[in-house]
Amino acid sequence: MTEFAIRLSGVTKTFGKHRAVDSLDLEIPRGSIYGLLGPNGSGKSTTIRMIMGILGADSGTVELFGRDPDETRRQKVGYLPEERGVYRKMKVLELIAFMGEIRGLDPSDAKRRGGEWLDRLGLPEWADKKVEDLSKGMQQKIQFICTVIHRPELLILDEPFSGLDPINQDVLEEIVRDFHGQGTTILFSTHLMDQAERLCERVCLISKSKKVLDGGLRELKRAERRGVLAVGFEGDDGWMRGPEVQRIEGVGEDYHLILTDDADPAAILQRAITSGVSLRRYELVEPRLHEIFVRHAGADAAVDGVPEGIEMSEMAAGGVA
């Protein structure tokens, strides 16, 4: 029987007249790396805050490790919220050790682990500097250390790589993979589909507060294979446009034709031959996650969300507020 780290059933949350999350069902198996994906304003952060018990659901049920998300269960979670916050006047190692202590670590153990993490992320010389003296990217790495210092059973990362340069993104992605390899359950929220495609085993796509797709990434891509035709050619491009083609996307030197459900690729091929172009590539391919999302949610899926501020206590206590 599958054990779930997180389970939501019929969860709805409304702010005034705005429905941020609408009848959401979600099951995240223990040990999985799961992507909660969608455009900004789609309801991802609100969903996470209900999982962490920071917000209450208007209706439906939220389970964390099989029960209500009480303080004991939240202590097993490492939560990195989208809106960052740090105690800027504290020294770096002091801050990390403090975060470890309020998550149940012995003071000496918290300090030791903090030093090890600073070494791993190339920041040992900043241990006695004030947090406010660090660059924004360095502060984000410190916040990440504070999130994982207690070796949580579940990591919830809300837009964790936002604002980081590519090198530091790669470093944190490697750490996320390491945690997953050790059996940690990871819920990874992002609007960057390419990043999710690199990291996630399973995904839930949300648009305008509703779930539009949910399942294993490989299975979803395999099921959508019929809908994307990759072509490369020399000559006029007019033949690509027709009733079978919903959208055309440039991918490197080639193109992806996003097809309608009843499209006949042979008819498109015949049109290419008739037009006299020189084809060097013509094949049905697995679509990118971005293409799958747009196919099901529409290109205009993004909506303006309700501004969501965050209190320092969310970062400080990992949602144990």
Image (cartoon, helix red, strand yellow):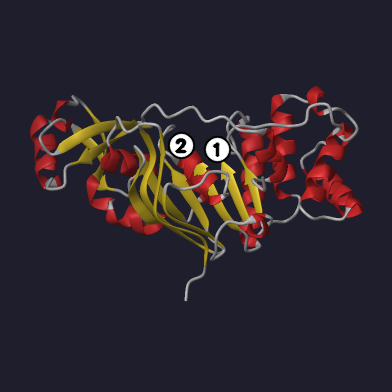
Q: Disc 1 residue type?
A: Glu
Do the residues bearing badges 2 and 1 touch, measured as CB atoms within 8 Å? yes
Instruction: Please give the residue where the numbered disc 1 appears in the rendered image.
Output: 159
Q: Is residue 282 at all visible to an observer of this figure?
A: no
Q: Is residue 132 above or below residue 232?
A: above
Q: Quadrant of residue 17?
A: top left
Q: Give percent across and percent down for residue 81.
A: 60, 39
Looking at the picture, tell me which residue is in the foreground, 20 or 166. 20
Q: Give percent across and percent down for residue 247.
A: 23, 33
Looking at the picture, tell me which residue is in the foreground, 304 or 158. 304
Answer few, some or many: residues within 10 Å of disc 2's Cα (few below 14, many 20 plus, some between 14 and 19). Answer: many
Answer few, some or many: residues within 10 Å of disc 1's Cα (few below 14, many 20 plus, some between 14 and 19). Answer: some
Q: Which mark is residue 191?
A: 2
Q: Is residue 10 above or below residue 309?
A: below
Looking at the picture, tell me which residue is in the foreground, 227 or 160. 160
Q: Is residue 68 above or below residue 240?
A: below
Which residue sits at x=75%, y=54%? Answer: 150
